Each structure stands twice: as C-alpha cells, then as structure tokens.
Image (tube, grey):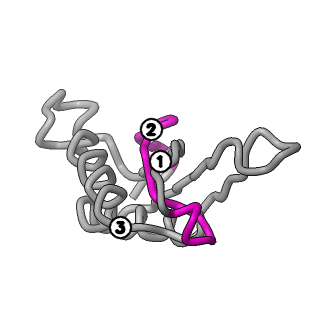
Amino acid sequence: MNNSSYLEVKDLTLMCRLGVTDAERSYKQKIFVTLRIYGDFNLPMESDEVVDTIDYTHVVDSIESLVQKETFKLIEHLAYRIREVILGVCENRLIEVYVVKPNVLRNARYASFTLH
C-alpha cells in the first residue's frame, strides 16, 4: 500500500464538551480538528468514482455525532476517540488526528495534541 498519499480535512470546527473540570464540561466549546487519512488512492485517481475512495462527508458526520453524544476531559482522549470512529469507517488506514482547543490558556493561542 502506498502510504505517501493522504486525504485531509483541515480545521473542522466542532462544538464539544471538553475540559478537566465539571464546570468546563458544562458548556460546549469550539475546537478544531484536522484529519489525515493515508492510503493508496491510485484507484480513485484513475476511476474518478466516489465509490472507490473515502467518503469524507461520512467521516465528518461520524465525528460530529461523536462529539455531540460524548463529553471529554482530555484532548488526548478526544483524539483517540476520533481515530477510533474513523477506523470504523475506513478500516486498515494510517490516521493522524490533530485537535486544537483555542483560548484555553491565558498566554497562549491554543493547546493542541497530535495523534499518529
């Protein structure tokens, strides 16, 4: 399998209950998620058929459903759960998940975590 090619969804904006304290998880906060799904994309490149590639709309819908139903204490756990959801849609893929939680620290733009 050629793993140098990937499909990317950049800065997916989600509203999520995420935080260490109960107070922080009591309201939805804006987060940004970037996904890279690696794989062999030769077939869809040649065929130009949606059925031969990853349905990224379905991937995004699955992630949106996850963050609407669950709450999370840590961005690391959120990234892990997102990867698990993607693997349920796209088996046997190398997946990177990058989660950004903006405005969480007084003197920084954001905190982030990357899962390879």
**Residue 6 position in % (x across, y down):** 45, 43
| The furthest residue to the top | 48
State the predominant SS element of the stretch in magenta.
Answer: strand
Which span is picked out in magenta? 4-25
Q: Which of disc 2 and disc 1 is earlier in sequence?
A: 2
Q: Secondary structure at mark 1?
A: strand
Q: Nearer the viewer, residue 4 or 94?
A: 94
Q: Quick check: marks 1 and 2 in contact, CB under 8 Å?
A: yes
Q: Is residue 111 above or below residue 82?
A: above
Taking the spot 33% from the left edge, 54% from the top edge, the residue there is 63
Dividing the picture into quadrants, the one containing residue 19 is bottom right
Taking the spot 61% from the left edge, 71% from the top edge, the residue there is 21
Spatial separation of the CA atoms under disc 2 and disc 3: 17 Å
Residue 19 counted in the magenta span: yes
**Where is mark 1, residue-wise?**
35
Spatial separation of the CA atoms under disc 1 and disc 3: 19 Å
**Where is mark 3, residue-wise?**
70
**Where is mark 2, residue-wise?**
12
Asked if residue 90 lies left or right of residue 5, the reply is: left
Q: Which of disc 3 and disc 2 is earlier in sequence?
A: 2
Q: Secondary structure at mark 2?
A: strand
Asked if residue 51 lies left or right of residue 102, the reply is: left
Taking the spot 49% from the left edge, 69% from the top edge, the residue there is 72
Residue type pointed to by label 3 = Glu
Q: Residues within 10 Å of mark 3 (few under 14, many from 20)?
A: few
Q: Is residue 116 visible?
A: no
**Residue 12 position in % (x across, y down):** 44, 38
